[in-house]
Amino acid sequence: MRRGSGIPWTAAAILCLTLAGQAYADWPNFFGPRYDGKSDETGFKKASDQPLKMLWDRQIGSAFSSFACVGDRIYTCGEADKQQVLYCLNADTGAVVWQTPFEKEFRNEHGDGTRATPTVNDGRVYILGAHGRLLCVDAATGKEIWEKQFNHKPTWAYSGSILIEDDLAIASAGKDDGALVAFNKKTGDLVWKCGDDPVGYATPYPFTFNGKRYVVGFMGNSTLAADITTGREVWRMPWKTDWDVNAAMPIFHDGYLFLTSGYTTGCALLKLSQEGDKLTSTTVWKSDVLLNKFQSCILHEGKLYGSDQTALKCVDFMTGKEMWSKPRLKNGTLLLADEHLVFLTEGGQLQIAKASPDDFVPSLKADILTGRCWALSALHGGRLYARNLERVVCFDLRE
């Protein structure tokens, strides 16, 4: 394993550091610091009549992992010597700072390797391997701190990333390992388990309702919510999908919970209510207007933006009404930054457009990758980090 020097891991450093003299907020886990796909980046290039400048690219082996970006380090996964590998890369150059093999290879006809994205918190990195090994390592060196093994791998392997909430590291493990399970993030000691549902493919999702903090587990054939401190189950409902593929991130907003799945299941908006120490839900609307197999939607100014199995779409959150649809742009990845949608097609074309319920009109288009691009990109310090199954690229979007 290669090792390199780390950055100072103080709380202030985690929140805001400087890369090449530019201040910015970190992107420390899957779908961003608020689990909503929204970046705090501003002032990046949104239109250009010149080719984008590639700063670096690196072959790291197969994985569907996205990126955690903290300070001058980028964390993602790949493959080497028939093992899944956790990589720490220099954000400026793409050089390998360290690499830690952590689980045997995973092979699949749709793409090999790790599915989850690293989570960086308080000087540690957490990753869940495709076969179910949860590993916590030192962010500066890649040295193992603690590990756990889950034993109920679904058809397309463990895919949910690790949620860090206060002192807890929360995972979706499945069955007797816990539909949701929480460990002490520093020691790995078990804190609580909730449910024994079969595991799905989604990352545990936190939200606050009536002043209390909860976590949603989007499982193989159900969805449930637990008190995030104690693990006490407070709500559940069946949610059956073909092949038990519930993968997209739930969205909570102003008392409403949105869920979406692919194949023929569709989506629903639920209104939550308090009933004693439990939660109840009523269905506001249910539809097949969004069929998200694995890509998650973003909620912005009352509209859902998402690239599902059929198209890139805009849908009204409260009514389920489709505002627009772009049928050729299915299964792409999407983040929101500075009021703009940053969209990467599954074939590797970058498109940036103003987020609008009226239409999707890209002001920038650039072919930046080839092959299967299903991993979420990241904006960090004016740079765009993107990948296909085996290759990571970094493009300069600074004005």
Image (tube, helix red, strand yellow):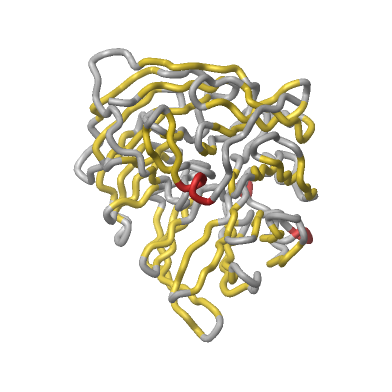
Q: Nearer the viewer, residue 89 or 175?
A: 89
Locate residue 269, reporting x and y percent.
Answer: 40, 62
Locate residue 224, reporting x and y percent.
Answer: 58, 65
| Quarter of the picture holding the N terminus | top right
Q: Is residue 385 above or below residue 7?
A: above
| Image-based side of 40 in relation to 392, left or right | left
Q: Residue at x 54, y 38 (%)?
A: 68
Q: Residue at x 59, y 48 (%)?
A: 121
Q: Quadrant of residue 314?
A: top left
Q: Nearer the viewer, residue 284 or 9?
A: 9
Whether residue 155 is visible here, answered yes or no, is no
Locate residue 149, reporting x and y percent.
Answer: 80, 48
Q: Residue at x 58, y 34 (%)?
A: 75
Whether residue 347 is visible here, answered yes or no, is yes
Locate residue 20, reporting x and y percent.
Answer: 41, 27
| Quarter of the picture holding the C terminus | top left
Q: Nearer the viewer, residue 105 or 222?
A: 105
Q: Quadrant of residue 4?
A: top right
| Image-based side of 264 in relation to 183, left or right | left
| Image-based side of 266 in relation to 229, left or right | left
Which residue of the protein is positioned furthest toward the bottom in this rendering?
Answer: 276
Which residue of the protein is positioned furthest toward the left in this rendering?
Answer: 358
